Amino acid sequence: MNGETDSIIDKMTQAGVLYGRKPSKTHPRMEPYIFGIRGNVTIIDLSKTKEALEKTSLWLKQKISEGALPIFVGTLPAAQTIIEEIAKKYNFSYVNKRWIGGTLTNFKVISKRIEYFKKLKEDRAKGEFDKYLKKEQRRFDKEIERLEEIFSGLENLSKLPDILIVVNINEHTTAVREARRLKIPIIALLNTDADPALVDWPIPVNDNARSSIHFVLGELDKAIEQGLAQKAGQGVQEITEESKENKNEN
């Protein structure tokens, strides 16, 4: 068990998960997660990160197996690619460019705009714009480009998400505030300058480094995969049991 723990901590060390912010920027509530100071940088206690990641992964796996739908949020360059990759892998929603205020708290209005955006793309794909003058076609194209910048990643957001997974809460205060207002559980990758009390499942990490973000989100990706497999297994079991009941009745 110790060997496994050492292996995980070694991997986190190699990924740069342990590097926090300057000591002067440390949030008081993050002090329990700090191992020490090296130079002018706080060092995150990776045993605490490992513990938080394991607990969060178990909870996420269970919620996914129950059918929960997450939304991923990470607009900083280091997070954008991995956020999009994981979300697209499961057809989950994501925001990796800019969070639109009201995405959650004004969902009815936002969802109508998303549907309008999807319809425009569908109409263009079907050739519906061919009947318009070139000037009108260009206007539609520009409108799609504009909406793409705003709503790309949200096309599958047909209902309010059940979980918010966010990288760097200081950069996404609006998203966190909206989720808290609606009591949507929040999983957050956060550094030593953030307030862990703002989220339900804080994971102390270096939320600036691409390698660090990739490692931690990779672990959450595994939890999602396991949760979906468990959900699929439960579905097969239910169908099998129902078939047996019907057979017995006949």
Image (spheres, rainbow, N blue to C red):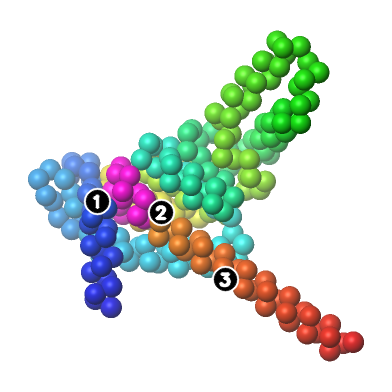
* Residue at the limit of the structure toward the left, as seen here: 39
Q: Is mark 3 on a helix, strand or loop?
A: helix
Give the amino acid type for the residue marked by disc 3 in the picture: Gln
Looking at the image, residue 53 sits to the left or right of residue 154; the answer is left
Q: Position of residue 171 (x, y in %)?
A: 39, 37
Using the rendered view, name the quadrant where residue 105 is placed.
top right
168, above or below 245, in the image: above
Disc on the earlier residue, 3 or 2: 2
- Please give the label number shown on residue 123: none
Q: Residue 145 or 27: which is nearer the viewer?
A: 145
In this figure, which residue is indicated by the disc labeled 3? 230
Marks 3 and 2, how far apart at CA: 20 Å
- Please give the label number shown on residue 217: 2
Structural crowding at the residue carrying mark 3, measured as other residues with C-alpha within 10 Å and reported as few (<14), some (14–19) or many (≥20): some
Disc on the earlier residue, 1 or 2: 1
Q: What element carries label 2?
A: helix
Give the amino acid type for the residue marked by disc 2 in the picture: Leu
Magenta stretch?
Answer: 204-216
Using the rendered view, name the quadrant where residue 32 is placed.
bottom left
Q: Residue 181 or 92: which is nearer the viewer?
A: 92
Q: Position of residue 204 (x, y in %)?
A: 31, 54
